Amino acid sequence: GAGVSQTPSNKVTEKGKYVELRCDPISGHTALYWYRQSLGQGPEFLIYFQGTGAADDSGLPNDRFFAVRPEGSVSTLKIQRTERGDSAVYLCASSLYGPSSYNEQFFGPGTRLTVL
Amino acid sequence: DQQVKQNSPSLSVQEGRISILNCDYTNSMFDYFLWYKKYPAEGPTFLISISSIKDKNEDGRFTVFLNKSAKHLSLHIVPSQPGDSAVYFCAASRAGNQFYFGTGTSLTVIP
């Protein structure tokens, strides 16, 4: 079966521009997570959705970052007024149930964002 | 503040020998720990997990050990194979909520 997919695989943008990153989770997975991985670091939690609602957005660094999951499946991470420090690999993961069920998160390949 | 730490950025091991990857954490409330493996240009893939009620979990060539008093866990791979060469991340959570990842250890298994 299909795993988690993310598009685009690479995105190069200029400072100050707006970008959208898309995540298609595994069909039937209720929980969806966004992480950011900077060079030499491990994945850093950004936000988690249970169904359509953002259950925990405590990891979003500031109000330039926003994510939606309007139908409880595909999710879009939106970054306004991009800065060079936003350059990183953005990872999406999904799991069958919410995180409190100790279940495995399946990761996508990530989107490499470069802000020039 | 890094709550999960992997102090060895890299490790090289001969094929057939044991690989031991280490991880330390600071939050005593963490009760679920995982290891993920990552190849270049791919997302991390789940390898093995352990809950805090256990001190050992084994799955084939992979064994994870948890020492709660020392806030330390380790992943043992034996025998190591060239296909095991990858970056390994440990992660921890409290009640299965958001995962905190370490910075990773790059394992190279030399044929």
Image (spheres, coloured by chain):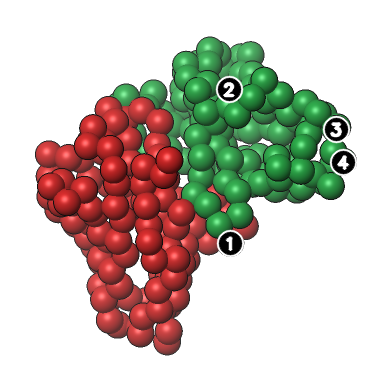
Chain colours: A green, B red
Instruction: Where is residue B20? Give x, y as percent.
Output: 28, 69
Kind of element beneath mark 4: loop
Identify the disc placed on residue B40: 1
For label 1, the SS is loop
Which residue carries the number 2 mark?
A73
> Which residue has dot 4 on it?
A14
Q: Which residue in the protein does label 3 denote?
A: A16
Dots 4 and 3: beta carbons under 8 Å? yes
The vertical placement of B60 against A109, above or below, is below
Please determine if labels 3 and 2 lie on a single subunit. Answer: yes
Query: Which numbered disc flags the more N-terminal residue, 3 or 2?
Result: 3
Between the C-alphas of marks 3 and 2, the distance is 29 Å
Q: Measuring 29% from the left and 43% from the top, which residue is drawn there? A: B26
- Residue B43, percent across and down? 54, 50
Q: Cβ–Cβ below 8 Å for labels 4 and 2?
A: no
Where B12 sits versus A48, above or below?
below
Q: Same chain for labels 1 and 2? Say yes or no.
A: no
Chain identifier of the residue bearing label 4 in the image: A
Binning the other alpha carbons within 10 Å of mark 2 as few (below 14), some (14 to 19) or many (20 upward) gives: many
Q: Nearer the viewer, residue A6 or A58?
A: A58
Q: Pointer 4: residues within 10 angstroms few (<14), some, or many (20+)?
A: some
User: Callout 1: few (<14), some (14-19), or many (20+) C-alpha neighbours within 10 Å?
Assistant: few
Determine the CA span between mark 4 and mark 2: 29 Å
Type of amino acid at the residue the image marks with label 2: Ser
Q: Nearer the viewer, residue A1 or A86?
A: A86
Looking at the image, which residue is at 60% across and 49% down? A38
Q: Residue furthest front?
A: B1
Return the disc, 4 or 2, that comes first in the chain's sequence. 4
Whether pointer 1 and pointer 4 mark residues with C-beta atoms closer than 8 Å, the reply is no
Give me the C-alpha separation between circle 3 and circle 1: 29 Å
